[in-house]
């Protein structure tokens, strides 16, 4: 379990205790102190002094991507799990349930459900994975799988709540990117392009804290540029491997338009700001090209649900025709109280 640590002293002990409470018998915990200026480094050292399976790496501040990569380089386990220091594992069976799913199915990536948690430490609604069991390998390559995992269930773009086979990451030279935001989405897109075997467990394995002080909890104006960086990087990775990533990136790009507008809406920025974010997304060359592909009907036939096919085509067509207000309005309506927590949980 690899945990980058930076300004996390308010939550770090909770996080570490949730990992140490796991039933899984053979567990290595790597804490990467990324030059944290608060009391977090002392907490890391104190826990390492008490538990021989904890290793602490102290380094100058480099950001979450390099911190996680330092953990990958130091890890010895067959599978890797990533967690942020302000989150928690959901119960003592979290790692065991993921490991069982991974080992039973020979998976390179195993993913579970999760629950959101407010800043008062109260667990909120459960959000399940896109599939309840390991999908057929042929189905994994389908547009339907891409749509479900990288549009409908954007949690597949997150690092947390999953196990990654270490040898798989090493064999394909996949590491967390240097981006300060959405670096986990880039890694998961690149992983998919290397044809991993997936497994899923319906159990909730992670408690994701909606922390207003975290990177994802803040109102960000740079989402269009960050999303362009992620999609362009994944496209370049695919080109080097001779893979066709058009549909995958198209679904990720369109989902990103809603995420950009949703981030503004969830921070009370108003409809005009949401429209501006969608407009700026469509100014990015990779995003514009892939969204227009969807508007032309590409990559849609593999989606078995006709209503979703129509909805995706309509959203892409609206963006391509510069009807940004329609997308922004749809995002604002989807962010009303009944869905607001789910929207916030999809922007990390």
Image (cartoon, helix red, strand yellow):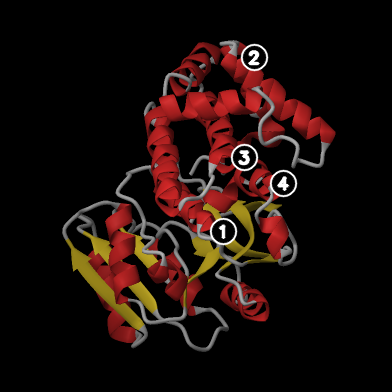
Kindly identify which residue carries mark 3.
341
Pick whichever, 132 or 312, lies toward us.
Answer: 312
Answer whether residue 226 is visible to the viewer in this image.
yes
Front of the two marks 4 and 1: 4
Kindly identify which residue carries mark 2.
326
Residue at the image point whose x is 37% and y is 30% from the top? 225
- Mark 2–mark 3 CB contact (< 8 Å): no
- Mark 4–mark 3 CB contact (< 8 Å): no
Instruction: Estimate the spatial distance between the alpha carbons at disc 4 and disc 3, rounded to whole Å.
Output: 26 Å
Instruction: Point out residue 147 in the picture as x, y percentages from the top left corner.
Output: 67, 43
In the image, is 180 to the left or to the right of 224? left
Instruction: Estimate the spatial distance between the alpha carbons at disc 4 and disc 1, rounded to whole Å.
Output: 28 Å
Instruction: Point out residue 70 in the picture as x, y percentages from the top left corner.
Output: 28, 66
Secondary-structure class at tag 4:
helix
Front of the two marks 4 and 3: 4
Kindly identify which residue carries mark 1.
207
Instruction: Point out residue 347 in the picture as x, y percentages from the top left corner.
Output: 51, 40
Of the numbered discs 4 and 2, the one sitting upstream in the chain is: 4
Marking on residue 144: 4
In the image, is 334 to the left or to the right of 250? right
In the image, is 336 to the left or to the right of 231? right
Residue at the image point whose x is 64% and y is 47% from the top? 146
Of the numbered discs 4 and 3, the one sitting upstream in the chain is: 4
């Amino acid at each position: 379990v690899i945990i980058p640590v930076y300004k996390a002293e308010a939550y770090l002990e909770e996080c570490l205790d949730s990992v140490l409470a796991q039933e899984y018998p053979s567990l290595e915990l790597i804490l990467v102190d990324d030059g944290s200026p608060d009391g977090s480094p002392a907490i890391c050292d104190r826990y390492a002094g008490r538990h021989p399976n904890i290793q602490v790496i102290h380094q100058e501040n480099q950001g979450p991507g390099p911190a996680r990569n330092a953990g990958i380089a130091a890890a010895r386990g067959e599978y890797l799990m990533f967690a942020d220091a302000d989150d928690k594992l959901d119960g003592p069976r979290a790692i065991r349930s993921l490991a069982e799913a991974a080992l039973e199915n020979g998976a390179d990536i195993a993913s579970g459900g999760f629950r959101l948690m407010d800043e008062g430490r109260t667990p909120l609604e459960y959000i399940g994975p896109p599939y309840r069991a390991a999908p057929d390998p042929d189905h994994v390559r389908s547009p339907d799988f891409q749509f479900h995992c990288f549009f409908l269930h954007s949690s597949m773009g997150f690092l947390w709540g999953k196990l990654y086979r270490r040898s798989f990451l090493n064999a394909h030279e996949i590491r967390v990117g240097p981006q300060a935001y959405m670096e986990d989405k880039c890694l998961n897109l690149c992983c998919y392009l290397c044809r991993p075997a997936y497994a899923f467990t319906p159990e909730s394995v992670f408690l994701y804290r909606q922390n207003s002080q975290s990177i994802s909890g803040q109102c960000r104006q740079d989402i269009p540029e960050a999303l362009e960086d992620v999609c362009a990087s994944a496209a370049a990775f695919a080109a080097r491997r001779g893979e066709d990533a058009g549909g995958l990136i198209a679904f990720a790009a369109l989902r990103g338009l809603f995420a950009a507008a949703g981030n503004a809406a969830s921070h009370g920025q108003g409809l005009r700001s949401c429209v501006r974010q969608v407009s700026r997304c469509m100014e990015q060359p990779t995003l514009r090209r892939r969204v227009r592909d969807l508007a032309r009907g590409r990559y849609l036939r593999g989606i078995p649900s006709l209503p979703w096919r129509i909805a995706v085509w309509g959203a892409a067509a609206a963006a391509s025709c510069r009807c940004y207000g329609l997308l922004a309005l749809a995002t604002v309506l989807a962010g009303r109280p009944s869905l607001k927590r789910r929207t916030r949980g999809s922007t990390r």
